[in-house]
Amino acid sequence: MPSAKPFVFICGPDDFLVGRMGKERFEAMASEAGADDFSREIVSGFANNVDEVATAVNRFRDAVQTVAMFGGKRVVWFKDVNFLADTVTGRSEGALNQVEALQELLGTVDPTNVGVIVTAAPIDRRRSFPKWCESHADFELIGGDADSAAEGLAGVALAEAREIGASFGDGAVELLLTKVGANTRLITEEVRKLATFAGDGATIEEAHVAELTPNVAEGDFFEAADRFFAGDLRGTLDALQRHFFAGGDSRPLISSLQNRNRILIQARVLIDGGDLRAPSEKFGFDKAAWARAQGAYATHFGGDTEKSSFNLFTQNQWYAGKLVAGAKLPTLRRLIDNQQEFIRAFEEIIRRPNEQETVMREMVVRCLGA
């Protein structure tokens, strides 16, 4: 269906998602217009400074105003525009002047002669230009606002699964995001891989993600930390062997262990105090109890909003419940002793830098051997 508006404007916080949607719309528009290779043009809107902003806008103007060589309709894609964001370049007077010129140009586009698509990521939606585009363009916001990043990433995975006829089982999306992190390109590729493994129309289960998805977000030490807090001595030692055989370092491993241990200490205190119930593997912490505990204790962390292992309530509720339920939650005394053992191991590695694997194995045996 042809757009009723003179141009298409696609934006969002993630350049991969915005660019992918822009490519789809560009190819559809060109196919609908019957535009050959000579009638299609892509202009880069990526700019590192004000001069490059001016160059990009001028090239886009030339492309829009050029007449098709063999008649018919031209299709122009102004791609990867980055000077609409709240950056030093985006806030500069020169860039703002160029944005005004861009708005004036877009306001004169005749969609019968030229199809125009503009893709921009990220953007500052507080400014007048994006608001103008919302009312004057075929406007699409992809991936939501940056403030809802976690929900947006889950939405990416779910949308990709729907597109290929797959679905997720309980906990599978959350585990996928935990392992992959905020990499939308990798999320989409992982969803397709997992769907292929599960089979046509099948459900992607948590076990599939655990087995097949790499631990990009936390690195190769993810496995060792999982085994350690499951109380699996042999599994932890085997994971350490693989970690160091692959050239891994002890410092990120100790950091991962400390971070999880801090979360478990806080959860142990709240569970012992009756503020939280021990979570289930499937559903995690009870949402109502979590909200009550957060309301009672979150202020004691100084209003922290950034994700931190020092503040249980900055963690994803499902993820925190998964960590606690997946661990054989020891006593508070044991958790504090673990923290002391991590410090001891770190100090020992400073003295024995060429024996990192040995130091870590000794520490694990002391913690789990009993």
Image (cartoon, rainbow, N blue to C red):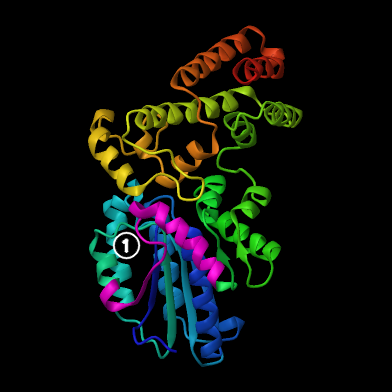
Which quadrant would residue 120 be assigned to in this image? Answer: bottom left
Q: Nearer the viewer, residue 106 or 165?
A: 165
Would residue 152 be counted in the magenta stretch? yes
As drawn, 8 above or below 366 = below
As drawn, 92 above or below 270 = below
User: Which residues fall within the magenta stretch?
Assistant: 134-162
Q: Nearer the viewer, residue 48 or 317?
A: 317
Task: Judge the density around disc 1: few (<14), some (14-19), many (≥20) Cα neighbours within 10 Å.
Answer: some
Residue positioned most to the top = 351
Image location (x, y in percent) of residue 274: 32, 33
Image location (x, y in percent) of residue 283: 46, 50
Principal secondary structure, stretch drawn in magenta? helix
**Residue indicated by mark 1:** 98
Which quadrant would residue 117 be assigned to in this image? Answer: bottom left
Residue pictured at 50% horizontal, 25% vertical: 330
Residue pictured at 27% horizontal, 66% vertical: 129
Residue pictured at 44% horizontal, 55% vertical: 47
Residue pictured at 37% horizontal, 27% vertical: 269
Q: What secondary structure is found at the residue carrying circle 1?
A: helix
Is residue 361 at least partly visible in the picture? yes
Q: Amino acid at mark 1?
A: Gln
The C terminus - image quarter: top right
| Position of residue 287 in the picture relative to residue 213 (left or right) | left
Image location (x, y in percent) of residue 326: 54, 39
As drawn, 333 above or below 245 = above
Would residue 194 be counted in the magenta stretch? no
As drawn, 134 above or below 295 = below
Which quadrant would residue 136 be assigned to in this image? Answer: bottom left
| Position of residue 125 in the picture relative to residue 52 (left or right) | left
